[in-house]
């Protein structure tokens, strides 16, 4: 769903190159364009691109999720929650943690 740290989020919307508030028709158009571009690039070269099949599958999975209203709603909810968690985690500093040393194990706790 998300990759990298919170400053570099790659979402399903990024894969299709659409905004998160895009309508279904915009998502469908971008999906079709992405598939056609991949097909065109694959036929233009005499050697297939490495990972072309993987890219097709990725685009297809994204479309299946974002093209369905219910699954898109669930995805959007999870995406917002992940972003909220990431923002909260960035607010915690090392000074906010308490250290418990149990000999072999050192634990950092946040109240």
Image: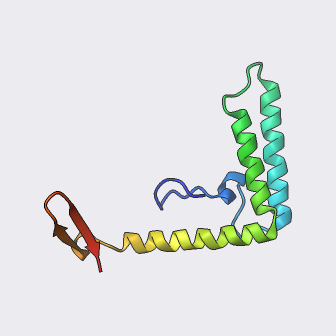
Q: Position of residue 58 (x, y in %)?
A: 71, 46
**Residue 93 position by quadrant:** bottom left
For the point 82% across and 33% down, which residue is it? 40
Instruction: Say which quadrant the N terminus sits in.
Output: bottom right
> Relative to residue 67, is residue 52 depicted above or below?
above
Visual colour scheme? rainbow
**Residue 73 position by quadrant:** bottom right
Which residue reaches farthest top?
A: 46
Q: Nearer the viewer, residue 63 or 98?
A: 98
Instruction: Say which quadrant the C terminus sits in.
Output: bottom left
Q: Is residue 78 left or right of residue 22?
A: left
Number of numbered discs present?
A: 0
**Residue 94 position by quadrant:** bottom left
Q: Position of residue 81 (x, y in %)?
A: 55, 73
For the point 59% across and 55% down, which residue is it? 10
Which residue reaches farthest bottom?
A: 111
Q: Position of residue 66 (x, y in %)?
A: 76, 62
For the point 74% across and 25% down, which residue is it? 48
For the point 82% across and 35% down, which residue is it? 39
Which residue reaches farthest left?
A: 103
Q: Position of residue 65 (x, y in %)?
A: 75, 60
């Amino acid at each position: 769903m998300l990759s990298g740290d919170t400053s570099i989020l790659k979402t399903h919307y990024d894969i299709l190159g659409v905004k998160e508030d895009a309508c279904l028709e915009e998502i469908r158009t971008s999906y079709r364009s992405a598939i056609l571009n991949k097909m065109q690039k694959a036929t233009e070269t005499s050697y297939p691109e490495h990972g072309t099949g993987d890219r097709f599958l990725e685009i297809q999975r994204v479309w299946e999720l974002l093209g369905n209203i219910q699954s898109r709603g669930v995805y959007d909810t999870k995406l917002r929650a992940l972003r909220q968690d990431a923002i909260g985690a960035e607010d915690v500093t090392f000074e906010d943690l308490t250290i418990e040393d149990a000999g072999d194990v050192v634990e950092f706790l946040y109240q």
